[in-house]
């Protein structure tokens, strides 16, 4: 894909997309683990796991179409959400 947006716009957009992707991924992961722990439908848990993996794969594929730096920006967004969610969960338990 030819890059039509300048890098100054592409990187923040990919970072924001990574934030949204990470939020959806880790919320779905939390939902899946709650289903497994509660003994709910294993088919639903499996479907959510598959959907989660397809979603993150598709998001990273779209980012890589804009180049390696865009992929790294999206990954940074996902890892930022992971860090924030882990920090939030630690403060809830103490």
Image (cartoon, rainbow, N blue to C red):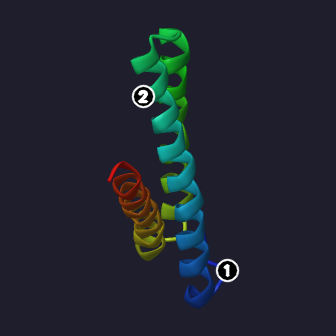
At 52% from the left and 62% from the top, the residue drawn is: 18
What is the number of the mark on residue 4?
1
Task: Name the secondary structure under disc 1.
Answer: loop
Q: Which mark sits nearer the N-terminus, 2 or 1?
A: 1
Task: Say which residue label 2 marks.
Answer: 33
**Which quadrant of the view contains residue 83?**
bottom left
Categorize mark 1 by other alpha carbons within 10 Å: few (<14), some (14-19), many (20+).
Answer: few
Q: CA distance from mark 2 to mark 1?
A: 40 Å
| Residue closest to the eye, 66 or 39 | 39
Give the image location of residue 32, x and y in percent. Answer: 48, 28
At 53% from the left and 79% from the top, the residue drawn is: 11
At 48% from the left and 55% from the top, the residue drawn is: 60
- Is 52 located above or below residue 69 in the figure? above
Give the image location of residue 4, x and y in percent. Answer: 67, 80
Q: Are marks 2 and 1 in contact (CB under 8 Å)?
A: no
- Is 11 located above or below residue 68 in the figure? below
């Amino acid at each position: 894909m030819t890059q039509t947006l300048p890098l100054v716009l592409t990187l923040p957009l990919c970072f924001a997309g990574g934030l949204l992707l990470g939020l959806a991924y880790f919320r779905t992961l939390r939902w899946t683990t709650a289903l497994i722990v509660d003994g709910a439908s294993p088919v639903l848990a499996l479907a959510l796991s598959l959907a989660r993996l397809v979603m993150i794969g598709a998001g990273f594929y779209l980012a890589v179409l804009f180049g390696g730096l865009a992929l790294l920006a999206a990954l940074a967004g996902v890892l930022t959400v992971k860090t924030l969610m882990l920090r939030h969960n630690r403060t809830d338990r103490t």
